């Protein structure tokens, strides 16, 4: 699998805030029970199969808490791992390992959970030509990491934020007065490289958006028969994106309607964390 770029400088404040939240004035239990010169090795192990994401973040957590720690990844982000596989190990002062453990695992488990769920959706639509997209439904402050995890799972990113593109949704249409008016206003405002996408729930809205010159149509919560009709209307005229109510049980059927993209908010707002653990053994006094 390819390696993906993660600019840690953009999330360093988040990492430090998470450490401060957990560590506070100090790890009372570890300071009380572990001597300052005890050295150990913590092995991070997958307790279930999945796709790994977030190793650079975990490494950064350990380094910030204790610069003397050495983090060694056994796999790469985007790699599939089996239950029982070693994901990484961290070697050095045990105090640092134990004080950083929870924050490092929180990031790694959460991001690996997103990557793993994305990977399941990608596998379910394999061969259809459809691309699985995320949305802006992310935990505040976590968007860059969550969207990185989606890419690690084989998905693609929708807009990162509101400034990245024009997506005219139902409330924009209501405020503008009509689909046509909203698209016309967007066309006058938009930079020439910006694509205009319009959300539609009914075929009449699809037809109006196409007539107004929309380049992509978000087909929201449409039943399969209506989706097929909408795709037929858009073919050769606009890209199509299905969204709303997408599950692992119905995603293949949605893909087979011929849409170009399927966007799934659940990838980033409710994926279950991948079960990972850190197992410690001493290697020094």
Image (cartoon, rainbow, N blue to C red):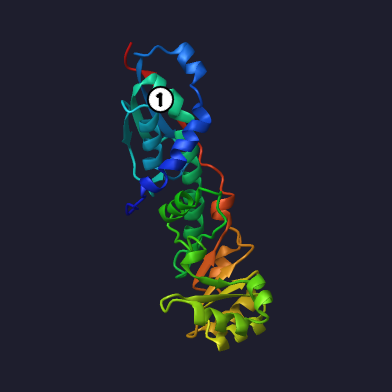
Within-10-Å neighbours for mark 1: few <14, some 14–19, many 20+: many
Give percent across and percent down for residue 141: 51, 48
Whether residue 5 is situated above or below residue 71 in the rendered picture: below
Dividing the picture into quadrants, the one containing residue 86 is: top left
- Check disc 1 and report its element: helix, strand or loop: helix
Relative to 149, 273 lies left or right: right
- Whether residue 186 appears in this view of the structure is yes
Give percent across and percent down for residue 114: 50, 49
Instruction: Say which residue label 1 marks.
Output: 97
Relative to 87, 122 lies left or right: right
Instruction: Tell me which residue sits at (57%, 58%) in the image.
Output: 265
- Whether residue 232 appears in this view of the structure is no
Relative to 80, 283 lies left or right: left
Instruction: Tell me which residue sits at (33%, 10%) in the image.
Output: 285
Relative to 179, 85 lies left or right: left
Instruction: Tell me which residue sits at (46%, 61%) in the image.
Output: 157
**Residue nearest the viewer, comparing 75 with 123:** 75
**Residue nearest the viewer, comparing 223 with 91:** 91
Whether residue 29 is situated above or below residue 243 in the rendered picture: above
Q: Residue furthest bottom?
A: 211
Instruction: Tell me which residue sits at (61%, 71%) in the image.
Output: 169
Give percent across and percent down for residue 181: 61, 83
Whether residue 255 is situated above or below residue 56 in the rendered picture: below
Q: How many marks?
A: 1
């Amino acid at each position: 699998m390819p390696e993906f770029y993660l600019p840690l400088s953009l999330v360093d404040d988040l990492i430090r805030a998470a450490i401060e939240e957990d560590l506070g004035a100090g790890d009372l239990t570890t300071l009380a029970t572990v001597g300052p010169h005890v050295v150990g090795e913590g092995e991070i192990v997958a307790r279930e199969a999945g796709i790994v994401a977030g190793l650079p973040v975990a490494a950064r957590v350990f380094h910030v808490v204790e610069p003397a720690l050495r983090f060694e990844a056994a796999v790469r982000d985007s790699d599939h791992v089996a239950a029982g596989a070693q994901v990484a190990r961290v070697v050095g002062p045990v105090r640092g390992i134990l004080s950083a453990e929870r924050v490092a695992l929180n990031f790694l488990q959460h991001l690996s959970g997103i990557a793993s769920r994305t990977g399941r959706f990608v596998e379910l639509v394999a061969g259809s030509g459809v691309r699985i997209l995320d949305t802006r439904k992310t935990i505040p402050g976590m968007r860059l990491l969550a969207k990185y995890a989606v890419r690690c799972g084989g998905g693609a990113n929708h807009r990162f934020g509101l400034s990245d593109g024009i997506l005219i949704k139902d409330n924009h249409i209501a405020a503008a007065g009509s689909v046509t008016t909203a698209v016309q206003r967007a066309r006058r405002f938009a930079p020439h490289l910006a694509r205009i996408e319009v959300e539609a729930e009914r075929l009449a809205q699809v037809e109006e958006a196409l007539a107004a010159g929309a380049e992509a149509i978000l087909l929201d919560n449409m039943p399969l028969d209506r989706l097929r009709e909408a795709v037929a209307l858009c073919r050769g005229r606009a890209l199509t994106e299905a969204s709303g109510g997408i599950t692992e049980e119905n995603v293949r059927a949605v893909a087979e309607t011929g849409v170009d993209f399927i966007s799934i908010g659940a990838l980033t707002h409710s994926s279950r964390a991948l079960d990972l653990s850190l197992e410690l053994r001493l290697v020094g006094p």
